Amino acid sequence: MKETYMHSSTMKRIISFDLDGTLVTTEYVDAVWLERIPEIYAETHALSFEEARNIVEREYLKIGPEALEWYNIHYWLEKFDLDIAWNDVLESCIDRVATYPEVPEVLEALGTRHTLIIISNAAREFIQKEMEVLDIGKHFSAIFSSVSDFGKTKKEKSVYEMVCERMGIEKSAMIHVGDNYLFDYAAPREARIEAYYLDRDGTHADEDHVVRNLKDFEKRITGL
């Protein structure tokens, strides 16, 4: 039997967004992890950029995105023996921060009818940098970093449950959307929270609760 969520499109809800890959393009985080860190590693250890990037990416993959260390800039700078301040690394790529085209319009529209929040796997350091650059922070009542605030990744359904507790709401009042199937779709649904999988590439277009962009998401939840 298909799981359903009964609600009115006019009822005020808590709309929860993932951050990177959902509201903000991945260009910034990719620049930090896949360009700047390898560049500094190459300079520090007298290697070519290609050699450094191969080493760095290999170490990333040993950890994987389900581990807290994956998101921890302090961990990686120490592991790679890089003598540079984390803030300098993040600042060096700040010009790469950008939202997806539909984001400002969608946030403006949904924010007039619902309470908007962010639940991200990104560490607080990254989130703060992105919010400093972008003019979208004003739309959100709360911004949660699962790794910084709860010491967990969003693969744990308890992250969503703890957010509901902190917001003082029932799980039925929340809708979440994000671009990672495990973190943003499977985990919240396991917690009995309505969720939508943002599939910008269109590889799961025919599946239930899948949207191609956030404008599509807005239409789905408002019944347009």
Image (spheres, grey):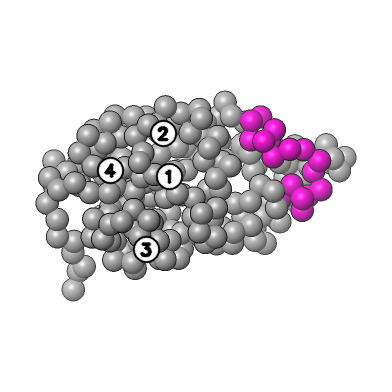
- Secondary structure beneath dot 1 equals strand
**Comes first in the chain, label 4 or label 1:** 4
Task: State yes or no: residue 109 in magenta.
Answer: no
> Mark 2 belongs to which amino acid?
Gly
The residue where tag 1 is placed is: 143
**Comes first in the chain, label 3 or label 1:** 1
Instruction: Name the residue nearer the viewer: 120 or 150.
Output: 150
- Secondary structure beneath dot 4 equals strand
Q: CA distance from mark 4 to mark 2?
A: 13 Å
Task: State yes or no: residue 86 in magenta.
Answer: yes
Percent across and percent down for residue 73 are: 66, 47
Percent across and percent down for residue 3 are: 21, 67
The residue where tag 3 is placed is: 161
Read off the magenta span.
76-92
The residue where tag 4 is placed is: 115
Q: CA distance from mark 2 to mark 1?
A: 9 Å
**Comes first in the chain, label 3 or label 2:** 2
Query: Disc 3, disc 1: CB below 8 Å?
Result: no
Q: CA distance from mark 3 to mark 2?
A: 23 Å
**At 79% across and 43% down in the image, what residue appears?**
82
